[in-house]
Image (tube, grey):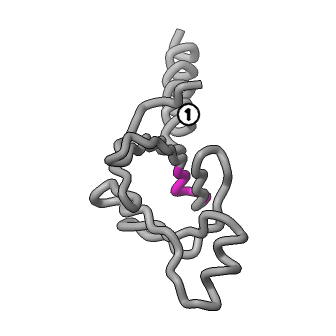
Amino acid sequence: MKIIKITLIILFISTINTYADDIYLSCESTTKLRTSFIINDEKEVLILDGIKREVVEWKKEFITFWKSETIKEISEPRNFKPDTLDRISGSYGSYNCKVVKKTLF
């Protein structure tokens, strides 16, 4: 009986860690346009609207990234800055973001 209890406890603890890896953000602009992020701090992966983006800088306070390879090629020679997701205020440009527990799909 003790073995079953210990096994269940270990299984429960391991499932908590696997679900805590990804953070889901739902963002809405003032014009009601929507976008979404999936953030994985452990792997430093940022997914915007289902597409993995190239991360420039990853910090606790913010994440800077290029929205696409084309925008990067155009912006870098002109010294334009990459997009920024502010993790403190929960903003991305004109979008306000909030953490959601799961995706819609």
Please, what is the three-letter code of the amino acid marked with disc 1?
Answer: Ser
Which is the main secondary structure of the residues drawn in magenta?
loop
Q: Position of residue 94 (x, y in %)?
A: 36, 57
| As drawn, 36 above or below 58 | above
Q: Secondary structure at mark 1?
A: helix
Q: Position of residue 42 (x, y in %)?
A: 56, 56
| As drawn, 5 above or below 48 | above
Q: Residue at x 38, y 43 (%)?
A: 28
Q: Which residue is mark 1?
A: 14
Give the residue at the far left of this rendering.
Answer: 89
Quadrant the C terminus occupies: top right
Q: Which residues are magenta?
A: 39-43
Q: Residue at x 29, y 60 (%)?
A: 88
- Taking depth in this image into account, of 47 and 2 the one nearest to the observer is 47
| As drawn, 81 above or below 89 | below
Give the residue at the far front of this rendering.
Answer: 31
Q: Residue at x 70, y 79 (%)?
A: 73
Q: Residue at x 51, y 48 (%)?
A: 37
Residue 3 is a magenta residue: no
- Taking depth in this image into account, of 64 and 22 the one nearest to the observer is 64
In which quarter of the view is residue 79 placed?
A: bottom right
Residue 42 is a magenta residue: yes
Q: Position of residue 23 (x, y in %)?
A: 47, 44
| As drawn, 20 above or below 55 | above
